[in-house]
């Protein structure tokens, strides 16, 4: 992945008399499921999310070792009694100040939907708290260029938060003008569809109620447990709704992957499709419907990312759960 930093030779010289290009940072919170090369980019930072289950504490920050430990110690990802402990505004402010004050001139921070998590509000208030300290630090270092910090609600979760983040990275690398980034990113956020396919209805209902989500009803849980029914839930624009139910995981996944394949053929607003899974990704990779989806993505110039879900996602979706996301105008949501 290429650097975000623009290379315009006309970049202005600041008061320290040294020259450096304007640099843009990109922040996501740890619940956002994105490709490993995105996380590895030097201009990307991840807001950690501590999680407490019983007496154990895990820090969700896209660290493979921490994720493996969580899965190993919690029945391959189960955390029905878990509690996330997001950073508050003061902690966010300190994080932003340390990471971005002197080396960046612009920062985009993309968060999980504000309708399901306090992270967005904490990041927004934290950025406001940090601004005076950042301006003071830059002035003391002789940096005269203005500093901008934007906190953006993705209005989605997990794989769905990853789509606008990766689309934004593409735009920054292509040096799209800021005014065009704003409009394009909002269009992608508005059109991002995230499909949640929990493997255990009872678990998913318990966790969804913690987030204020009522899309899985008790009757459906009782019926689904008896018949091995697997639901598919759509998340879009800060809300969720059930859009399908199928007999068993195989049928649910096959129908979901076929739905995504049809959408790829119709066209996407961003050339990414993300699948995140609460378990060994080999479980997903061996599905024949995924192979068909991959071939279609390759033919249409879309990058298919099959990822291990964040610890936060695993705790909320449950072991064996899957999320799939893309940005585009689907012809239909129910299937």
Image: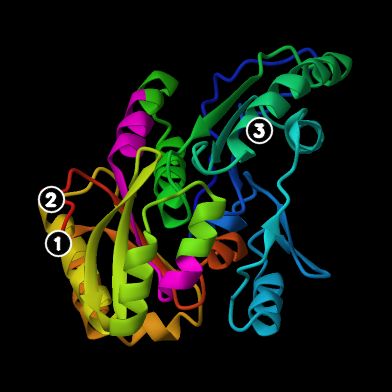
Other-residue count near label 3 (Cα within 10 Å), few / some / many at <14 / 14–19 / ≥20: many
The residue located at (12%, 58%) in the rendering is 265
Q: Which is closer to the viewer, label 2 or label 3?
A: 2
Q: Which residue is mark 1?
A: 335
Marked residue nearer the N-terminal end (3 or 1): 3
The residue located at (41%, 43%) in the rendering is 164
Q: Which residue is mark 3?
A: 123
Position of the C terminus by quadrant: bottom left
SS for tag 3?
helix
Q: Which residues are magenta?
A: 183-204
SS for tag 2?
loop
Q: Is residue 274 in view?
A: no
Marked residue nearer the N-terminal end (2 or 3): 3
In whole angstroms, how far apart are the C-alphas of marks 2 and 1? Answer: 8 Å
Other-residue count near label 1 (Cα within 10 Å), few / some / many at <14 / 14–19 / ≥20: few
Q: As displayed, is residue 36 above or below residue 181?
A: below
Towards the viewer: 92 or 132 = 92
Q: Which is closer to the viewer, label 3 or label 1?
A: 1
User: Is 323 covered by the magenta stretch?
Assistant: no
Answer with left or right where residue 292 lies relative to residue 172. Answer: left
The residue located at (63%, 62%) in the rendering is 62
């Amino acid at each position: 992945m290429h650097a975000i930093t623009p290379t315009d030779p006309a970049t202005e010289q600041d008061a320290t008399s040294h020259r450096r290009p304007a640099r843009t940072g990109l922040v996501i919170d740890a619940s956002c499921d994105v490709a490993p090369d995105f996380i590895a980019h030097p201009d990307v930072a991840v807001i950690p999310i501590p999680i407490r289950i019983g007496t154990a504490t895990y820090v969700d920050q896209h660290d493979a070792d921490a994720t493996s430990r969580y899965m190993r110690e919690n029945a391959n990802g189960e955390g029905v009694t878990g509690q996330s402990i997001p950073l508050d505004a003061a902690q966010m402010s300190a994080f932003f100040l340390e990471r971005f004050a002197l080396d960046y001139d612009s920062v985009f921070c993309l968060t999980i939907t504000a309708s399901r998590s306090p992270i967005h509000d904490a990041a927004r208030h934290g950025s406001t708290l940090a601004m005076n300290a950042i301006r003071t630090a830059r002035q003391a270092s002789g940096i005269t260029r203005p500093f901008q910090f934007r906190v953006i609600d993705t209005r989605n979760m997990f794989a769905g938060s990853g789509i606008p983040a990766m689309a934004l990275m593409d735009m920054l690398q292509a040096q799209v003008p800021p005014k065009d980034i704003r409009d394009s990113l909002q269009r992608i956020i508005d059109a991002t569809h995230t499909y949640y396919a929990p493997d255990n209805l009872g678990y998913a209902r318990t966790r969804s109620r913690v987030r204020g989500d009522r899309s899985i009803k008790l009757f459906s849980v009782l019926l689904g447990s008896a018949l091995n029914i697997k639901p598919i839930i759509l998340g879009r624009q800060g809300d969720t709704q059930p859009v399908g139910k199928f007999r068993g995981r195989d049928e649910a996944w096959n129908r979901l992957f076929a739905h995504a394949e049809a959408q790829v053929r119709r066209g996407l607003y961003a050339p990414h499709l993300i699948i995140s899974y609460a378990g060994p990704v080999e479980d997903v990779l061996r599905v024949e419907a995924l192979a068909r989806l991959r071939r279609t993505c390759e033919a249409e110039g879309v990058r298919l990312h099959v990822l291990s879900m964040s610890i936060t996602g695993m705790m909320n979706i449950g072991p064996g759960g899957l999320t799939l996301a893309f940005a585009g105008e689907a012809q239909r949501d129910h299937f």
